[in-house]
Image (tube, rainbow, N blue to C red):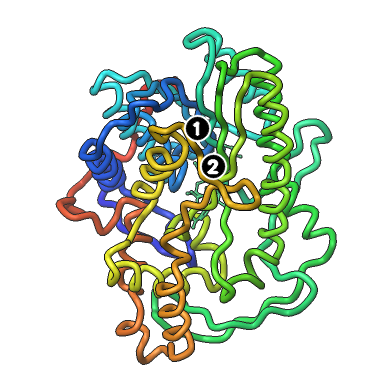
Amino acid sequence: MIVKPRVRGFICTTAHPIGCAEHVRKQITYVKNQIKLSKGPKRVLVIGSSTGYGLASRIVATYASDAETIGVFFERPATKSRPATAGWYNSAAFEEAATADGYYAKSFNGDAFSNELKEQVIQQIKQDWGTVDLVVYSLAAPKRKHPETGEVFSSVIKPIGKRFTSKTVDFQSGVVSETSIEPASEEEIEQTIAVMGGEDWEMWLHALAEADVLAEGAKTVAYSYIGPELTHDIYRTGTIGKAKDDLEQRGRALNHYLQQKCNGRALVSVNKAVVTQASAAIPVVPLYISLLYGEMKKQGVHEDCIEQMFRLYQDRLYRLDGEIPVDSQDRIRIDDLEMKPEIQQAVEQKWEKLTTENIEELSDIEGYRRQFLRLFGFAIEGVDYEQDVAIAVPIKSIPE
Ligand code: NAD
């Protein structure tokens, strides 16, 4: 099949198998060119490992720390007439490369929120490893079925208490307009917390600890975001921010629990804004990222998922001196470059002036578009998109 991008709003409904593999290969090459971690983890479970920050975390664990990995994700394989999702192709390519390089890599495709999947992963850990050193929690989901009550929760991205009005961009056309979003109801806030808050992370770690598969000194890390004033009303003080508050709060309790259980640690890392399938869905954020990428590239400090995750492991989680620097609320801050005053001031000044007419010049919207397409394996240098490709690609460790 000849696979072309089909973009609908903030999603692309097709993905290119060769392009996704190449995107993964480039991330692997980046890590291979960095120094190895001398104190890194050796057995790593990544929940949400097929795209974005989770995929980058898995690649860094493997190639910077020589770790064995188990990945968990929710992706769709190809059908006769329809390509698989990008996360499926990424995971197939990752396993292919990792096993060729001599690394253990197994994957589970299913609902990470369910008790069944947790049990399957625990059995695999017992059988193959005994214990796990690091659990990365990198889920971003629109819905969650509660494993005890069966209730299905949906997350929404809305402000709280007042209507939110802001500039936004249709990143395909480059048209800048004003968007207005009504505030969330109490019910919507609760549901968003149930999906994107910390309960499921806590459930994973409790299940792993009770099954006695956490190594002495095991760590777990989950990802959060803060961002600038510009996006606070829709992000940090909105519904999704409430979920992140819950994640961070539960992280502190989990830290205490793990200290008792296995001398372990639970940490939340505040990461920078990057182009992923999850962030593309948040109003205003693509416009902010276009300005941010432009400014960070200009100042020579640009980072995508892989650069962020390498720095998280190397300069925060597994530093040579064993220290893990955290802020006053016990959070790792790997968003330090994004939040530099000189970057934020430049972004803010441009934000004020931004219009449809000058967006290409003032921001890196072109870089945003390219990066968005790359998430689905398109716009990757060296890939021939006119070529017929096989869309059915197996993931080595997943039975067909
Ligand atoms: P993403 O959309 O790229 O990845 C989400 C992952 O979750 C995928 O592997 C997907 O398969 C998996 N997933 C979704 N539902 C699942 C389910 N029910 N069962 C199993 N797997 C499931 O997202 P991302 O942007 O990398 O986000 C990961 C985390 O990082 C989130 O907590 C997000 O809030 C946080 N974060 C993101 C940004 C950003 O700018 N993208 C910034 C800071 C923090």
Q: Quadrant of residue 80?
A: top left
Instruction: Name the residue tied to disc 1.
Output: 46
- Looking at this view, name the residue that lies furthest to the front: 321
The residue at label 2 has a CB less than 8 Å from ligand 1: yes
Q: Residues within 10 Å of mark 2 (few under 14, many from 20)?
A: many
Query: Would you say residue 79 is visible in this rendering?
Result: no
* Residue 261 % position (x, y): 69, 19
Amino acid type of the residue that numbered disc 1 sits on in the rendered structure: Val
User: How many numbered circles does the render carry?
Assistant: 2
On the image, which quarter does residue 88 sit in? top left
- Rendered location of residue 329, percent (x, y): 65, 51
Name the spot of residue 380 as percent of width and height, x first. Answer: 23, 54
> Do the numbered discs 2 and 1 sit on residues whose CB atoms are within 8 Å?
yes
Question: Going by the image, does 258 lie left or right of 399?
Answer: right
Image position of 106 with respect to 169: above or below? above
- Residue visible at 31% across and 34% down? 93
User: How many other residues sit within 10 Å of disc 1, few (<14), some (14-19) or many (≥20)?
Assistant: many
Which residue is identified by label 2? 138
Tell me where residue 190 sits by quadrant: bottom right
- Kindly identify which numbered label has been placed on residue 97: none
Q: Quadrant of the C terminus?
A: top left
Q: For the residue labelled by badge 1, is the local secondary structure a helix, a strand or a loop?
A: strand
Which residue does the image show at 60% across and 25% down from the upper left? 264
Q: Which numbered disc, 2 or 1, marks the residue that appears first in the sequence?
A: 1
As drawn, is 215 to the left or to the right of 311? right
Kind of residue indicated by mark 2: Ser
Q: Secondary structure at mark 2?
A: loop
47 and 20: which one is in front? 47
Identified at 38% across, 28% down, the residue is 395
